[in-house]
Image (cartoon, helix red, strand yellow):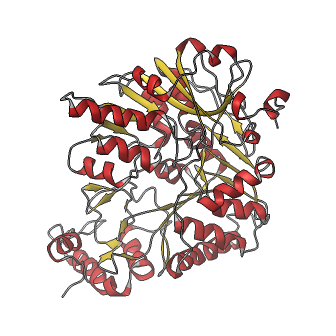
Amino acid sequence: MPTLPAPLLRSTVANRVRSQVFRNKIVSAQEAVEWIRPGDTVAISGFASAGTPKAVMPVLAERIRRARAEGEDFTVGLLTGASVSAEVERELAEADGIALRMPYQAETTARGRINDGRMDYVDVHLSHVAQQVWQGFHGGVDVAVVEVAGITESGDLIPATSVGNSKTWLDVADRVVLEVNSWIPEALAGTHDIYYGTALPPHRTPILLTAPEDRIGQPYLRIDPARVVAVVETHAPDSAVALTAPDATSEAIAAHVVDFFGHEVRAGRLPADTLLPLQSGIGNVANAVLAGLSKGPYRGLTCFSEVIQDGMLQLIDDGTVRFASATAFALSEAGREKLVDNIDYYREHIVLRSQEISNHPEIVRRLGIIAMNGMLEADIYGNVNSTHVMGTRIMNGIGGSGDFARNGNLSLFLSPSTARNGAISSIVPMVPHVDHTEHDVQVLVTEQGLADLRGLSPRRRSRVVIDRCAHPDYRARLLDYVERAEAVENAGQTPHLLGEAFGFHRRYQETGTMRTP
């Protein structure tokens, strides 16, 4: 654990900015937002809501609304780590203030603007964002707005409850606005590990991280004070992540996953007590899987993931998890309070990194990650759609699932077997949008069962997926489809009836259900 300067440990709400150079730059949010101009590309901190700027962005949304009322076309490009707080995204979207969004979103108003063609959206693997920005794929970053917990006497920045792409934004932005949030526990300082050794080809060197608890960087972010145009003081909590108790479906999915781990241990492919480092997506199914692990024989597990959820805190509490590496917290209100009240304890078991490290393919492959992510649907051959409803309408984005699925030691995709009260089957003949090809999908899990697709040809895969993952209401029709596809002359390695491949989706669009009459 890095040694923290003594004055930091004694700071109060009034003196989170202890560098005189930065103190001289303190202004109101209204003054700071004047540095953002129409047409700018604005990069903000935040990942799964944690660490989203609290003061400047709402003021920007109001400024855009006023400008539009006066007939001015005021939009910005918005770059983030992943999702940010729903309030910030919604206010900017409602003001029609976002021209381009990248790389991930999870808010209904913004989603509607994207699907209506009123907002450009670029869906990107999270591990690719930093490189693409450095290479100028999205133009330059005009302004970065980054939340931090404080500024030391020497000008180092204490990261917030997420790191995400904050390091990249601070490195590349022409103008930087810092929000210093005194709500963040001071004891969070030292939790972070910020690595400054990444580079673009051909100058890359190996990233020497061989275990989730390894520290390869420094506890602070850094910035040239000359590029900081404003410092804004805030005192506001992160938005809480909505969380409901696991239902019977998610608990059934979790039970299948835990049973599978036992099978892999018995086969000698996973260590008996500690498995391999775990990655888990966000949501109730993911939390149910984590809860299921606490009921098993595993102790001293490690995690190398994107977020720390409520379930992860509980696993740390009961000793199931020894250490967790991530880039952000994604906590409910109760989980957030638990973290704040026990931050000294959790700091010994958690590290937060930049997302170019938390999602780095080299590290994911080296550590042998067990990747567990959600999906919208899978087809009978194991291709997965995790982003587009009915193949065309974006839901959220691919996020980091591809970083872990393609490069991990095991890749599992989890989903209830149906949606919309059974009107939609999550197992279909052919997915109309592919995020993860059959080559990156090893295991599919629904509450019906688990399909291990490793070592199976497509024809064999189809039977396993239908038998073990499809809901009984759809199983017979899926089996009929594949049998008729195989009976066609020259059916090929991956048989399909091209005239019927999207029949499930077409029926839903026409009748409101994928079921046959």
Residue 397: percent from left, percent from top: 39, 50
- Which residue is found at the position 31% from the left and 72% from the top? 428
Q: Residue at x 27, y 81 (%)?
A: 483
Decide if residue 506 is in sight here: yes
Q: Nearer the viewer, residue 23 or 418?
A: 23
Q: x%, y% of residue 450?
A: 51, 76
Q: Is residue 108 above or below residue 175?
A: below
Q: Quadrant of residue 72?
A: top left
Give the residue furthest to the top: 226
Quadrant the C terminus occupies: bottom left
Q: Examine the image and state in which quarter residue 232 appears.
A: top right
- Residue 500: quadrant of the picture: bottom left
Rendered location of residue 144, percent (x, y): 48, 26
Going 22% across and 80% down the picture, which residue do you hit? Answer: 484
Residue 481 higher or lower than 22, as above or below? below
Left or right? Give the position of 447 relative to 37.
right
Q: Residue at x 49, y 31 (%)?
A: 130
Residue 354 in picture, x, y percent from top left: 59, 37
Tally the numbered discs.
0
Name the image quarter holding the N terminus. Answer: top right
Q: Toward the viewer: 201 or 252?
A: 252
Question: In the shown orientation, is residue 165 left or right of residue 479?
Answer: right
Residue 277 visible in the shown view:
no
Near-viewer residue (366 or 286): 286
